[in-house]
């Protein structure tokens, strides 16, 4: 196989893996949003619970997990487009 074809095949495989990883993260973000909205509609979420949830709160890890996923998705998108340092 020529070096160019090998590069394109490997690049394609890497892009596919990154794409599926990004899609899984987006899927998880949507699940988190759905769970949060459902909880908010059923119980309501005060500003205090949202920003400083108690250990017993079902949304205690929501903001951090969602933020981490969002940052990873942005990082992968930049990497895909070659705009990431």
Image (tube, rainbow, N blue to C red):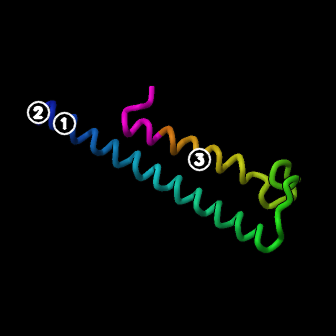
Q: Determine whether the residue tagged by mark 2 lies in a helix, strand or loop.
A: loop
Which residue position holds label 3?
69
**Dot placed on the residue nearer the N-terminal end, 3 or 2:** 2
What's the mark number on residue 35?
A: none
Question: Local crowd at mark 2 within 10 Å, few (<14), some, or many (≥20)?
Answer: few
For the residues labelled 2 and 1, the Cα–Cα distance comes to 6 Å
User: Marks 3 and 1: in contact by CB < 8 Å?
Assistant: no
> Badge 3: few (under 14), some or many (20 or more) residues near its Cα, within 10 Å?
some
Q: Secondary structure at mark 3?
A: helix
Q: Look at the numbered disc 1 and give the secondary structure of its residue.
A: helix
Residue 39's spot in the image, x, y percent? 76, 68
Left or right: 40 as drawn, with respect to 56: left
Crowd around label 1: few <14 · some 14–19 · many ≥20 (10 Å): few
> Residue 2, labelled with which disc?
2
Residue 6 belongs to magenta span: no
User: What's the magenta region?
Assistant: 76-85
Task: Check contact, mark 2 vs mark 1: CB within 8 A.
Answer: yes
Give the label on residue 6, or none. 1
How far is mark 3 from mark 2, CA to CA?
38 Å
Q: Residue at x 11, y 33 (%)?
A: 2
Judged from this view, the residue extending furthest toward the top is 85
Residue 23 in the image, given as x and y percentages of width and height: 46, 55
């Amino acid at each position: 196989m020529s070096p160019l074809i090998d590069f394109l095949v490997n690049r394609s495989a890497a892009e596919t893996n990154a794409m599926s990883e990004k899609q899984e993260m987006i899927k998880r973000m949507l699940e988190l949003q759905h769970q949060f909205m459902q909880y908010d509609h059923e119980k309501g979420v005060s500003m205090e619970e949202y920003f400083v949830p108690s250990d017993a709160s079902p949304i205690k890890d929501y903001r951090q997990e969602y933020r981490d996923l969002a940052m990873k998705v942005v990082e992968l998108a930049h990497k895909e487009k070659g705009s990431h340092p």
